[in-house]
Image (cartoon, helix red, strand yellow):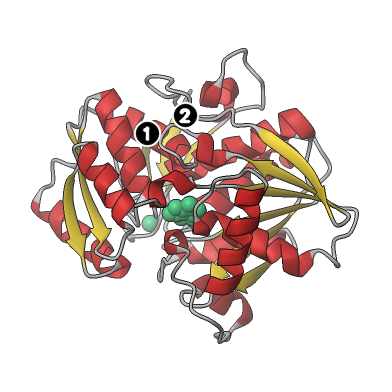
Amino acid sequence: MVAYWYCPRCGFREDFDKAYYWKCPRCGSPLKIVFEGRYEVSKEKGLARYKTLLPLTPLKYIGEGSTPLVKSVENGVEVWFKLEYLNPSGSFKDRGTSLALTYARKMGFKTVVDDSSGNTAISISLYSHIYGLKPIMFIPRTAPEGKKRMLRFLGAELYESVDRGAASRDVVDFVEKNPGVFYVAHTWSYFYILGAATIAYEVFEEAGVPDYVIAPIGSGGLILGLAQGFKTLLEQALTTKMPKIIGVQGYSVQPVSIALKGIETPGEASDLADGIMVPNPPRLTEIVDAIRESQGDVYLVGNSEIRSACNKLVEEGFLVEPTSAAPYAVLEKLKQKIQGKTVLIPLTGSGLKIIH
Ligand SMILES: Cc1ncc(COP(=O)(O)O)c(C=O)c1O
Ligand SMILES: [Zn+2]
């Protein structure tokens, strides 16, 4: 498959196999990986099932993807829960990580570095083990203790920064001083968008296209992947329907909501949802465009709604972390408006990591 790096902002273009760029070397914008491919379902499990829509497939299958879809009717709304927390490291991030680290290996890198609130760091550390890479992680000091312990257990070299924003700055300093390392830069990375798009392909294959998707937004890889996945199916005339994309952020950190509505909305603190405390998502404009194009919206939640949604999910048998419960809290607000509709909610991260 002929694939190339492409910058939509300045037109920079380079062969995918020639060199790695975590951002455009000319103008500093997020890059895309462009390639041709038609939706076809192979007999394999995991991401390789949709290999015609990927520029590469994971080096070794350890169970990422092919997650269960559990349907449940709640007050007249048909909810499709996609159990992404059952991925190998307990979050949907494994989809993107398996692609990014396969590429790192292919390009001959030995060390991978990233900044993360926790789940991506855990995912990268696990896959580094399996793929033979050394992981170095920058995380906020405030990350849940259980996640930090898991990272140490997985052998990651750990640097704790003051907060999430500082972790992003510290990692860039480190990468500039150590140019031989592979900076995953998952908040910028197109691999994570391609990985999340496979969630849409799996849902389509099993159940079709939902009326709505409600998903948390941190850096936006998940929501951009879902939007792109369903859009690809639409563009390839496999469906005539595009779901409305509802993004979810917390009141404490709401860049997408501000960009979409032009004003900050005050509300209760939302730091329980640590996975979506990303103040400056590099793909902010793309996220806003994807939501607008789907005629979707952004909703905000606070700690008490998140806590009660998380408890309800656990009562239904879904052992998820608070960030993953944020969309369920939004479903509560939307129920009256979307009677009789189908709603996809990816349950993104496992609750097992936050027990300490
Ligand atoms: C559990 C969980 N859900 C959702 C997200 C948000 O995903 P994204 O950063 O792709 O927007 C994250 C990000 O870390 C996460 O850890
Ligand atoms: Zn550029």
Label 2 packing within 10 angstroms: few (<14), some (14-19), many (20+): many
Quarter of the image for residue 238 reads top right
**Residue at image x 21%, y 58%?**
172
Label 1 packing within 10 angstroms: few (<14), some (14-19), many (20+): some
Q: CA distance from mark 2 to mark 1?
A: 9 Å
**Residue at image x 37%, y 47%?**
120
Quarter of the image for residue 69 reads top right
Secondary element under disc 2, as helix, strand or loop, is loop
Out of 126 and 165, give the one closest to the viewer: 126
Q: Position of residue 95 (x, y in %)?
A: 47, 35
Please, what is the three-letter code of the amino acid marked with disc 1? Phe
Q: Is residue 341 above or below residue 33?
A: below
- The total number of labels drawn is 2
Q: Which residue is mark 2?
A: 55
Q: Position of residue 29 (x, y in %)?
A: 38, 59
Would residue 300 appear left or right of 95 to someone viewing this image?
Answer: right
Q: Given the current orientation, which residue lies at the most extreme left position?
A: 177
Mark 2 Cβ inside 8 Å of ligand 1:
no
Q: Is residue 29 visible?
A: yes
Out of 109 and 314, give the one closest to the viewer: 314
| Number of the front mark, 2 or 1 | 2
Q: Position of residue 315 (x, y in %)?
A: 65, 50
Please, what is the three-letter code of the amino acid marked with disc 2? Pro
Q: Which residue is mark 1?
A: 16
Q: Is residue 40 above or below residue 4?
A: above
Would residue 355 appear left or right of 169 to someone viewing this image?
Answer: right
**Residue at image x 22%, y 70%?**
162
**Residue at image x 60%, y 39%?**
83
Out of 333 and 294, give the one closest to the viewer: 333
Query: Which numbered disc, 2 or 1, marks the residue that appears first in the sequence?
Result: 1
The answer to whether mark 2 and mark 1 are in CB contact below 8 A is yes
